[in-house]
Structure formats: C-alpha cells, structure tokens
Image (cartoon, rainbow, N blue to C red):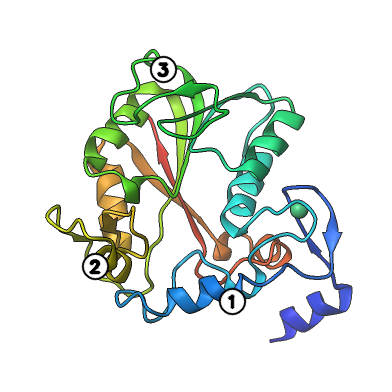
Amino acid sequence: MKFRKLLNLFGKKSCPGCNNSIRKFNQIEKSVSSSLSSIYSAPQGFEALSVDSYYCPICGANDRDRLILSYIQRNHTSHCSILEIAPSKAVRQQLVKNKFSYRCCDLFMHGVDDQCDITNMTCYADQSFDIVICSHVLEHIHDDSKAISEIARILKPNGQALILVPIPIGLQANLYDAAIEDSETRIKMYGQADHVRMYSRSGLTDLIKNSGLSLKTWTRSDDELAFEKMGLSSTSTLYIGIKQ
Ligand SMILES: [Zn+2]
C-alpha cells in the first residue's frame, strides 16, 4: 500500500501516553499471546488488540490506553471533568499531568480516589462528569445494564462515556451464562477467570443504545494517519456513548 510505504519513510510512531516518538511499540508478552489462542470464541483475535504493537517501551501505555488518550486529547480541553473506572496507570498519569479534573474509582483496587461498585455509584451525584472512561470493566460485571445506566446517570448533558471491552472479531452475539462459575470454563469462553461475559460488537452497541446514550464510534477510517502512528490495529474501535 502506497500510504504505508510513505509513512514508513517518515518512520516513527508516536505515543499519546508520553508524547514521545518511538521506532516501534512492543509486542504483547508471549505468555499472553499463547493464552489468547486457547479462547475458543476468538479464533480471529480481538477487535482492538494490537498484538504486534501492544505497549509503549517508554511509558507502558497499551493499545487501548493510546486509543482513549488520543481521543481525549483531540476532542476535549483540560477544563473537562473525567472519571476513570478501574484506572490504567498510563491513562491516569497523562490526564493528571495535563491538568484535567480527574477522579478514579474501583471496587477492589487500592490507591483509587473512590471505592465504589459501578452498578451503584452513590458517591457521585447525577450529571457530575464530562467524560467517564470505562475500559475493560463491563465484561467483569453480571448486571451490565445497571452499570451502563449508572454511567449515563453521572454524565453531564453532552457528556461522553468512552467504552472498551474485549470483542472477538466475527463473534455474532454475546456469550453469557450466569451459571458458569468455574475458572477453566470462563477462561475458555470469556478469556479470563474473572470475566463473566464475552461481548459481540452488536451486544455492546445494543447495551449502550438501550441505556439511552446515543452511540458514536472512532475508528481507523476516521483518521488513518493517527491510528497508524499510534500502532493500532485496523479493526480498533472506540465506542462512545453520548448523553443527550
Ligand atoms: Zn508512551
């Protein structure tokens, strides 16, 4: 492809986690990539997983961290108030450094600003945040409808929920069976022992739309150059739920 050759001439990748130019992002660890191949629902890999350019060698930002940070840096000013659920170190560092009004929460993680269950976020009033980041969280939650409705509740009007979950390429419908509790079966079906669901693309988009949020996506076709520079796969998609 001519475009890629041209880019390679100019060379470098850039990381929105640390703003450094680098030669390349590092591959995902071998132990992780081999365990991914045992997930029977994801024979073609995952939509937003860039196995060959997974994390930044300088700041450690992974592919989904870069997708989220780049979207925020392009679309929002530091006047925004942001809540990150189950914070990523790279995202948190960069948003705090850039002086966003930032809070983070989790039910179990230490060192967060607020300890709370995302299906019942009583610590936050209605319409508290311009942005809520919820990356790789919903697949851990049985009552994901309750979680997304809580996220919608705490967003300000026109606020945006930035949502990512593991989505196998080609999976037609969510896989979910509340009766499955043993680790081995969950790993095979959902990818991790603490995951309770595997989302399909339509399963996630229906969840967002059914919560009353309107849906927008940010994909490589919206900005080919930016996605190439960030080392993101061609299928990487950020799901954005917007409060009306
Ligand atoms: Zn970086």
Q: Is residue 196 above or below residue 69?
A: below
| Dot placed on the residue nearer the N-terminal end, 3 or 2 | 3
Residue at figure coordinates x 24%, y 33% from the top left: 146
Residue 185 numbered tag:
2
Residue at figure coordinates x 34%, y 53% from the top left: 194
Q: Please identify, in this view, whether the residue under mark 3 or under mark 2 is nearer the observer.
A: 2
Image coords of residue 135 (percent x, y): 47, 46
Q: Mark 3: give few (<14), some (14-19) or many (20+) Cα within 10 Å.
A: some
Asked if residue 88 lies left or right of residue 244, the reply is: right
Say if disc 2 is inside 8 Å of ligand 1: no
The residue singled out by tag 3 in the image is: 127
Quadrant where the C terminus is found in the figure: top left
Residue 109 numbered tag:
none
Instruction: State how far apart marks 3 and 1 are (Cα).
Output: 43 Å
Q: Mark 2: give few (<14), some (14-19) or many (20+) Cα within 10 Å.
A: some
Between 223 and 29, the residue placed more toward the observer is 29
Between 176 and 210, the residue placed more toward the observer is 176
In the image, what residue type sits under mark 3? Answer: Gln
Residue at figure coordinates x 28%, y 61% from the top left: 183
Asked if residue 197 lies left or right of residue 129, the reply is: left
| Dot placed on the residue nearer the N-terminal end, 3 or 1 | 1
Q: Please identify, in this view, whether the residue under mark 3 or under mark 1 is nearer the observer.
A: 1
The residue singled out by tag 1 in the image is: 30
Instruction: State how far apart marks 3 and 2 are (Cα).
Output: 39 Å
| Picture mark count | 3
Q: Quadrant of residue 188?
A: bottom left
Q: Secondary structure at mark 2?
A: helix
Q: Is any part of residue 212 visible from this angle?
A: no
Q: Is any part of residue 230 visible from this angle?
A: yes
Image coords of residue 62 (percent x, y): 63, 57
